[in-house]
Amino acid sequence: MNRTPLAIDFADVAAAAERLRGVAHRTPVRSSRTANERSGAQLHFKCENFQRMGAFKFRGAFNALARLTPQQRRAGVIAFSSGNHAQAIALSARLLEMPSVIVMPHDAPASKLAATHGYQQGMRGSEVVLYDRFGEDREAIGRRIAQERGMVLIPPYDHADVMAGQGTAALELIEDVGALDTLLVCVGGGGLLSGCAVAAHARSPGVRVWGVEPEAGNDVQQSLACGEIVRIETPQTIADGAQTQACGALTFPVLRALAQGVLTVSDAQLVGTMRFFAERMKMLVEPTGCLAAAAVLEGAIDLRGQRVGIIVSGGNIDLARYAQLLHA
């Protein structure tokens, strides 16, 4: 499929865009005069919180499942996820009429758990398997079930088709607003950042692509600094979509080759950015979805005078938890 040493190239992202055409939403790009004044830059927010199932994850999940053979589709898929990839796989499997098993942490947001169950309703052979994210290995659980049931394991980020699908978010953004000086993308395992970096460099030569992760979980920042994958304990952060312990074997080489670096923000800064989105842009954005914007709005990087793209990755959060964070 690929013609370069990296797991994906732009041809893979372009092919994913064709598979997603008419299936994924072409999410809006929004701007904010207040945000522009605050940063001194022209900011373009790619709002994946309006994507199907509420996050960018649908892009990679559907692209990966759409490439499975008829035999693989009959056997079904298994995935492990804190929530958004879970929902994305469950919804994509439903659309493609395949069974799905989703391994989710027992403390996953209730709304994400309920949505995953909802997408699986009525689908024979589909279920959610819960685990303890602080004491059990979700990858080991996923591999075991896949082997026992003959299902295809689709990881949340370290998969070429998933990476290529996620990159379509940046492709659409640049198609809609033109060339960018800088693109900021949240990073957990690196699937979104790697795919977006490939797309951005192909469509906006000279762009600087930065990842943003929580201060409490800066494994990718450490990995890029030392030139090898660093594994950490599960980070304690409100950004549940970035509670990964290490980036992927496929994503890391792409990040080394194409990312400018990784910035970090605190949980308090994420809450401030959630409040900004709600008050100023009238959008509900989950903590992980605020990572890239927080780096800009909180001054983690100087972007004055630049044209800047920001991926707002998702909006799935329990309303009770949302209210609690904003009123803390």
Image: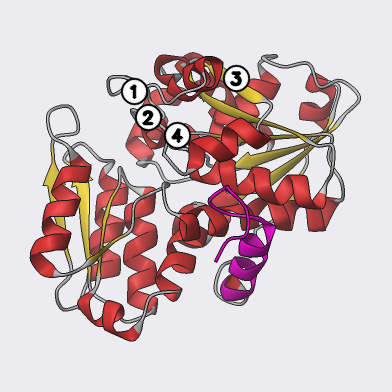
Tell me which amino acid carries mark 2.
Ala
Upstream in the sequence, badge 3 or badge 2?
A: 2
Residues in magenta?
1-19
Furthest residue in direction right, as rendered = 305
Specify which label sits upstream in the sequence, 2 or 1: 1
- Identify which amino acid the numbered label 3 is placed on: Leu
Disc 3 or 1, which lies upstream in sequence? Answer: 1
**Within the magenta stretch, is there residue 17?**
yes
Q: Is residue 134 magenta?
A: no
Q: Residue furthest left?
A: 148
Residue 133 position, x and y percent, is 19, 33
Q: Which residue is mark 2?
A: 246
**Distance (Cα) linking label 4 and label 1:** 12 Å
- Dot 2 and dot 1 residues touching (CB under 8 Å): yes
Q: Which residue is mark 3?
A: 263
Location of mark 4 (residue): 188
Residue 114 falls in image quadrant: bottom left
